[in-house]
Amino acid sequence: MALDVLIVDDSAAIRKILHRVLRQAEIPLGEVYEASNGAEALASLERHRVNLVLTDINMPEMDGLELLRRLRDSEAWKSLPVVVITTEGGKAGVLEAAKLGAAGYVKKPFTADQIKEKLTGLF
């Protein structure tokens, strides 16, 4: 089954790297959409159905935690798997993401193997 994915990060370079890493990890990809913050991500989700969201925490306008809150508060998206990709490591943001129902997190910098390991079992 090909996965449609939304990558949310304020860095265009990180979004491109994540796209490439998903391919290197041999994740069966369908469409890959991008957003630079949580608000853009919500707008993209209104237009496109996805199977997975990969999001940074620290972004302008709407951060990844607020995005996750809104997804979990929505009937349409409350069970959508969200993996947090962040520089935060074990800090409060990662703990909050776990409380909000994130499917997991990967610390930046990341490898294709780390992404593959985190996504294995989600689908």
Image (tube, rainbow, N blue to C red):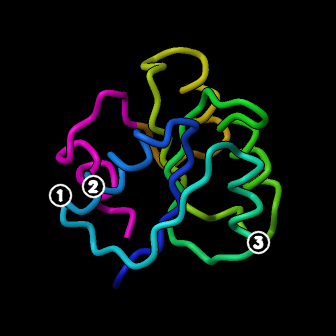
Whole-percent x and y of residue 95? 57, 25
35 left or right of 54? right
Tell me if label 1 and label 2 are in contact, CB under 8 Å: yes
Whole-percent x and y of residue 6? 53, 61
Q: As drawn, which residue projects farthest toward the front?
A: 12
Residue that carries the numbered disc 1 in the rendered image: 24
Residue that carries the numbered disc 2 in the rendered image: 20
Position of the N terminus by quadrant: bottom left
Q: Amino acid at mark 1?
A: Gln
Q: Amino acid at mark 2?
A: Arg
Circle 2 or circle 3, nearest the eye: 2
Whole-percent x and y of residue 73? 82, 55
| Residue at the image point whose x is 28% and y is 75% from the top | 28
| Residue at the image point whose x is 39% and y is 63% from the top | 122
The local secondary structure at tag 1 comes to helix
Whole-percent x and y of residue 79? 63, 64
Marked residue nearer the N-terminal end (3 or 1): 1
